[in-house]
Image: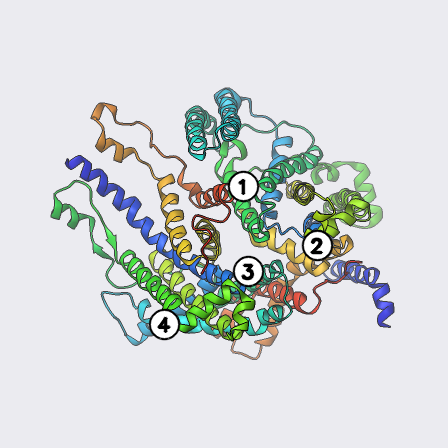
């Protein structure tokens, strides 16, 4: 029996996951199922990205949130219509400022290479920075003053939002390259702390640079890759179709949109999963695992460990950025304040570890599983505490406090599940082969 | 002359005093992170939540004492409650070590696994804290607010700028000095402290010379619990207690520990002040200071601020990145515990 379970472990677990989603459809509603499923798919892609870094190469990246947010930035910059008034007010200033900024970076690097003196580099950097601020500050102020309640930023390029997905991957990859250059090759926990810090900086940047992202004013109403419910409800073909299904047109249109998103996301997930599996089973994948398991031995075999780490770090981050862009596409809005490390970094990690580090199918399953419980834990916890305390006086303060605190139970539950997995099943639900 | 003094007082009031206060809080936090790093050899991501847990219990006891009418005015009641907060935190870390960390220690898990385990404990403790006290802001300071008010200072000196020192700032700096002195004495003068340093320098050699590793680990955890509870309470008294801010404190604390050189207690303290002072110095608007120093017609029109205050926390990461690039071993490298 146990060997049968071990052989068929992955299919059985995936079937279980499928049944749970169906159960939600039957018990709650199909709309909820597809909302869950869409987020599960995005989580699975993010988990794949983390798995590429951690499972293949043993790199501990705690900056998932930052890479996901960069993907989100790509989504608004690619898809939103440009704001000509903003460009007229300060487009040149921004361009000039950015050029000075880039020039400063190059000048600093050149100074270091030429003189090897950090004091010179600091001087160049500070002067360049002040120059950039002098040029960019008035431009930023001018742009943010243009009709701040609806605009006040430069806008995007007005291209189809699906294009933003690869662009999001590129943004995240570029950031990862810089971070990797700095932190890879140092002690392993420095990468963790550096990525954690840089992801926070990215969020601070997105929150405060209104000219680029509208900051805390958020960007709403992103264009969609799928039709709008209102248009569907008005089309007679869709009305007839809903009638044959026996559903009210409103519900049918909402569900239809969600199913379209699901199809899109499934296609992306399948594509990335296929590539990941190919990579894992290629000579390159074997080499990565060899480096992971024994860096010294791999280095002695002539493998350039730091370079390979950088490659895999950039690749994994690109996948996370892609998922981040998809997430913003699904939400239809970009709200920098919603990015917090618990939800966007640590939860993804829990997915990978519980699913099975090093196994792509495990990461996908973990993404599904953990997201499902993250969402459903709240009603379950509430119900649990409600029934446990049902014998108590309904007006009792203790009961009220417990019910109020139930929302925080999932934080604790995730932590406990993580600790138990690390202790009793460190290989996760679907272990690496 | 008065202008120079005014400029100095202005700097002291808005930069140096708050910087030293925040720096002391970070230094105590970083000291805890560094101790765990040198004895147990992992970066403890749960440290912010341990601080938050200690502060929470201090708040509970403060409320209890306030209910009894106990008070040590002009000092805040929280100082009376702090020892109980420390005890509660010690109990927490002991339970945590027995149930979670001991297994991984015995199995010689890699330090990245330890790091992930510490993230797990961060979740659990964070959940407990939010469950017990709620995610909202708690202000638990009572007693006299100021040691010196700006107005009194102005009257005393006749300057046009005032220097205010809050009671919490005074308490923080004094406590930090006492605690740091104690830790220094403990590590250098006591037998347990010396065995801890030996263990951190070379584990195998220490084991050979008969040092009991279980005892060293336990003492380290107890010290860390005390440090965390003190640092957390001081921060909470000075600002306010909110579970989310404590999680965010983790990053400046790590920055402080790395800037000073992980594993080096002296470095952790220096790192705390470096990070805190530069956070404030970089986001400080120097307009008025310069206004005092130059002739009126040259007075600056802009705020003279390097970075907007929104980026305050980001500054610690920028310092961190600079240190990682230039000198990854920290400012005080080569000397551990």
* Whether marks 4 and 3 lie on the same chain: yes
- Disc 4 from disc 3: Cα separation: 27 Å
Which residue matches tag 3? B42
In the structure shown, which secondary structural element does the residue marked by tag 3 occupy?
A: loop
- Number of other residues with Cα within 10 Å of mark 4, as a class: few under 14, some 14 to 19, many 20 or more: some
Which label's residue is closer to the chain start, 2 or 1? 1
Specify whether B102 is left or right of A303.
left
Labelled pair 1, 4 in contact (Cβ < 8 Å): no
Labelled pair 2, 4 in contact (Cβ < 8 Å): no
Front residue of this view, candidates B211 and A72: B211
Front residue of this view, candidates B94 and A219: B94
- Disc 2 from disc 1: Cα separation: 33 Å
Which residue matches tag 2? A294
In the structure shown, which secondary structural element does the residue marked by tag 1 occupy?
A: helix
Mark 4 vs mark 3: in front:
3
Which residue matches tag 1? A202
Which residue matches tag 4? B83
Q: To which chain does the residue with label 3 belong?
A: B
Q: Position of residue B289 (x, y in %)?
A: 26, 35
B26 over A419 or under it: above or below: above
């Amino acid at each position: 029996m146990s060997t049968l379970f071990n052989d068929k472990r992955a299919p059985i677990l995936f079937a279980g996951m499928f049944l749970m989603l169906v159960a939600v459809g039957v018990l709650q509603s199909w709309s909820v199922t597809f909302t869950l499923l869409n987020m599960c798919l995005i989580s699975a892609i993010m988990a794949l990205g983390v798995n590429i870094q951690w499972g293949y190469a043993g790199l501990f990246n705690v900056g998932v949130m930052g890479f996901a947010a960069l993907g989100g930035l790509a989504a608004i910059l690619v898809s939103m219509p440009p704001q000509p008034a903003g460009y007229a007010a300060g487009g040149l200033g921004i361009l000039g400022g950015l050029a000075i900024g880039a020039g400063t970076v190059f000048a600093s690097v050149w100074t270091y290479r030429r003189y090897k003196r950090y004091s010179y580099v600091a001087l160049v950097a500070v002067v360049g920075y002040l120059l950039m601020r002098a040029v960019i500050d008035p431009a930023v102020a001018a742009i943010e003053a243009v009709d701040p309640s609806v605009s006040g930023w430069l806008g995007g390029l007005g291209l189809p939002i699906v294009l933003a997905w690869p662009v999001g991957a590129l943004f995240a990859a570029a950031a990862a390259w810089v971070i990797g250059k700095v932190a890879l090759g140092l002690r392993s926990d420095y990468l963790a702390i550096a990525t954690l810090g840089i992801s926070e900086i990215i969020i601070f940047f997105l929150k405060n640079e209104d000219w680029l992202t509208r900051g805390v004013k958020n960007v709403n109403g992103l264009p969609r890759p799928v039709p709008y419910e209102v248009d569907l409800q008005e089309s007679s073909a869709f009305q007839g179709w809903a009638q044959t299904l026996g559903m009210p047109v409103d519900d049918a249109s909402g569900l239809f949109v969600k199913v379209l998103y699901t199809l899109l996301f499934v296609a992306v997930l399948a594509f990335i999963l296929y590539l990941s599996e190919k990579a894992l089973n290629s000579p390159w994948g074997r080499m990565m695992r060899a480096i992971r398991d024994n860096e010294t031995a791999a280095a002695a075999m002539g493998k350039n460990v730091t370079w390979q780490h950088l490659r895999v770090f950039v690749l994994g981050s690109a996948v996370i950025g892609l998922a981040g862009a998809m997430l913003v596409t699904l939400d239809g809005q970009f709200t920098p304040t919603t990015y917090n490390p618990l939800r966007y970094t640590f939860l993804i990690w829990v997915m990978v570890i519980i699913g099975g580090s090093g196994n792509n199918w495990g990461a996908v399953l973990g993404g599904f599983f953990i997201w499902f419980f993250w969402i459903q834990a709240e009603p379950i916890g509430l119900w649990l505490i409600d029934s446990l305390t049902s014998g108590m006086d309904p007006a009792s303060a203790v009961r009220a406090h417990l019910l109020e605190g139930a929302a925080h139970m999932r934080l604790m539950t995730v932590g406990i599940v993580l600790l138990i997995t690390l202790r009793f099943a460190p290989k996760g639900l679907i272990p690496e082969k | 002359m008065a202008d120079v003094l005014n400029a100095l007082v202005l700097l002291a009031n808005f930069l140096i005093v708050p910087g030293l206060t925040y720096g002391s809080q970070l230094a105590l936090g970083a000291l805890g992170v560094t101790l765990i790093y040198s004895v147990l050899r992992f970066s403890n991501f749960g440290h912010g939540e341990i601080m938050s847990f200690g502060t929470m219990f201090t708040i509970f006891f403060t409320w209890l004492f306030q209910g009894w009418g106990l008070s040590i005015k002009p000092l805040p009641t929280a100082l009376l409650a702090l020892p109980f907060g420390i005890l509660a935190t010690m109990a927490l870390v002991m339970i945590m070590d027995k149930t979670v960390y001991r297994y991984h220690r015995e199995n010689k898990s890699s330090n990245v696994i330890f790091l992930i385990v510490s993230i797990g404990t961060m979740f659990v403790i964070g959940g407990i804290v939010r469950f017990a006290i709620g995610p909202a802001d708690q202000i638990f300071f009572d007693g006299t607010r100021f040691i010196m008010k700006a107005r009194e200072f102005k009257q005393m000196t006749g300057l046009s700028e005032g220097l205010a020192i809050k009671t919490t700032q005074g308490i923080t700096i004094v406590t930090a000095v006492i605690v740091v002195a104690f830790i220094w004495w403990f590590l250098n003068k006591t037998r347990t402290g010396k065995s801890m340093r030996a263990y951190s320098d070379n584990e195998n050699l220490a084991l050979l010379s008969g040092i009991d590793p279980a005892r060293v680990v336990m003492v380290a955890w107890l010290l860390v619990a005390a440090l965390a509870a003190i640092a957390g309470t001081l921060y909470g008294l000075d600002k306010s207690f909110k579970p989310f801010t404590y999680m965010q404190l983790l990053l400046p604390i790590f920055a402080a520990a790395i800037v000073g050189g992980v594993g080096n207690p002296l470095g952790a303290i220096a790192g705390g002040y470096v990070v805190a002072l530069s956070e404030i110095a970089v986001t400080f608007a120097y307009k008025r200071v310069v206004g005092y120093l130059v002739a009126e017609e040259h007075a600056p029109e802009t705020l003279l601020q390097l970075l907007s205050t929104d980026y305050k926390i980001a500054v610690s990461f920028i310092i961190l990145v600079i240190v990682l690039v230039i000198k990854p071993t920290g400012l005080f490298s080569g000397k551990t515990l």
